[in-house]
Image: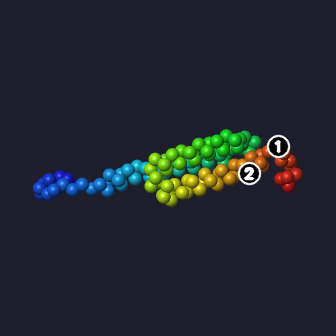
């Protein structure tokens, strides 16, 4: 575009929106990559055998992921309004509720009669 403006000896225009859009696309791509990481992590948890479940470790991982998401949102505040950000946040909120319940079910106090 700039070459054509030079060719016709026109004043070169600057499109600030293009720079802003590039920044937003970069952050959006980063957020989608983070969503893929979270989904992959949670899918791995679902494949864990019941006997091997350690909810303390899973809760710590979930907290770290939540912190990473909040850091991303604080770095680029527009991100918090995007649906993908809200979806990741909701997924982590659900996991934060489910993990303590799984911990209770995994307790040694649970006997066979509780499952019947």
Looking at the rendered image, the quarter that the N terminus falls into is: bottom left
Q: How many marks?
A: 2
Callout 1: 10 Å neighbours few (<14), some, many (20+)? few
Callout 2: 10 Å neighbours few (<14), some, many (20+)? few
What is the CA distance from the residue labelled 1 to the residue labelled 2?
A: 14 Å
- Viewed as shown, does residue 72 lie left or right of 16? right
Which type of secondary structure does the marked residue at label 1 adopt?
Answer: loop
Colouring style: rainbow
Which type of secondary structure does the marked residue at label 2 adopt?
Answer: helix
Residue drawn at the location 61% of the way across and 51% of the way down: 92
- Viewed as shown, does residue 8 lie left or right of 38? left
Task: Please tell me which residue lies in front, 54 or 69.
Answer: 69
- Residue indicated by mark 2: 101
Residue drawn at the location 77% of the way across and 46% of the way down: 106
- Residue indicated by mark 1: 108
**Residue 36: image location, x then y, percent:** 53, 49
């Amino acid at each position: 575009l700039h070459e054509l403006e030079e060719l016709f000896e026109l004043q070169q225009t600057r499109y600030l929106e293009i720079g802003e859009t590039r920044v937003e696309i970069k952050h959006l791509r980063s957020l989608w990559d983070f969503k893929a990481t979270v989904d992959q992590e949670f899918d791995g948890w679902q494949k864990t055998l019941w006997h091997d479940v350690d909810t303390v470790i899973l809760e710590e991982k979930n907290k770290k992921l939540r912190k990473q998401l909040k850091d991303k949102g604080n770095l680029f505040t527009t991100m918090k309004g995007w649906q993908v950000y809200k979806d990741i946040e909701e997924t982590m909120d659900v996991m934060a509720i489910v993990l303590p319940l799984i911990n209770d079910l995994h307790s040694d106090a649970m006997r066979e009669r509780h499952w019947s």
